[in-house]
């Protein structure tokens, strides 16, 4: 059986550490919003998914380079990641009392996986833009949604006061 040459521990470099470290840190930041809102998939889940996607991407790129592109399709990393995150997301989404719960968390896990893949591939402009946009979407749109919820609650209480 032909095996690829082992990568020794002293060969670790700053490039590898930056790819995996950025994924872990961004995963924690992405999960912070979910954690603060008390959702099941919080900082640890997001960090692990983002880190695992980065590690998987680094590994497949390295294997592809070592094997010279023979017998491999590195794009299958996206397929595997999508399937895995889809399974987790499906387990999170709940339909209860006529409302869907955890849909944003499931979508957020997908974003964490994509950012992890981009970190693993060292696509730093994509990492920066995706992390910034997703953090802005989660924080700013949450503020807008909270204000809308307050307005709806205010209308309901006014309607109840009118009925009394």
Image (cartoon, grey):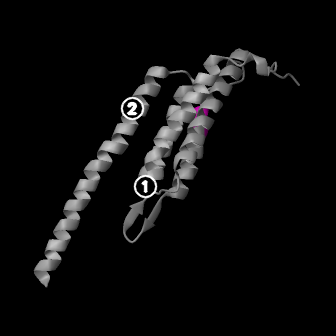
Dominant SS of magenta comes to helix
Over which residues does the magenta segment extend? 76-80
Q: Secondary structure at mark 2?
A: helix
Q: Secondary structure at mark 1?
A: loop
Task: Please tell me which residue lies in front, 89 or 79.
Answer: 89
What label does residue 132 carry, if any? 2
Q: Tell me where residue 78 appears, x and y as whole percent.
A: 56, 34
Q: Does any portion of residue 140 appear in the rendered image? A: yes
Q: Residue at x 57, y 35 (%)?
A: 24
Q: CA distance from mark 2 to mark 1?
A: 20 Å
Q: Is residue 11 magenta?
A: no
Location of the C terminus (image quadrant): bottom left
Q: Tell me where residue 143 appears, x and y as whole percent.
A: 28, 49
Q: Residue at x 78, y 22 (%)?
A: 9
What label does residue 116 carry, if any? none
> In the rendered image, which residue does mark 1 sit on?
37
Q: Does any portion of residue 73 appear in the rendered image? A: no
Q: Is residue 148 above or below residue 2?
A: below
């Amino acid at each position: 059986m032909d095996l690829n040459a082992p990568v020794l521990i002293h060969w670790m470099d700053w490039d590898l550490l930056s790819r995996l470290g950025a994924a872990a840190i961004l995963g924690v930041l992405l999960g912070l919003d979910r954690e603060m809102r008390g959702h099941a998939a919080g900082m640890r889940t997001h960090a692990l998914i983002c880190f695992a996607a980065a590690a998987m991407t680094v590994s497949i790129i390295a294997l592809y380079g070592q094997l010279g592109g023979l017998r491999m399709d590195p794009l299958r990393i996206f397929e595997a990641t999508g399937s895995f995150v889809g399974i987790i997301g499906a387990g999170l989404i709940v339909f209860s009392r006529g409302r869907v719960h955890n849909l944003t968390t499931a979508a957020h896990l997908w974003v964490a996986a994509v950012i992890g893949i981009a970190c693993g591939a060292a696509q730093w402009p994509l990492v920066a833009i995706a992390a910034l946009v997703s953090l802005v979407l989660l924080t700013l749109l949450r503020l807008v949604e909270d204000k809308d919820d307050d307005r709806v609650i205010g209308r309901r209480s006014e309607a109840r006061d009118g009925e009394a």
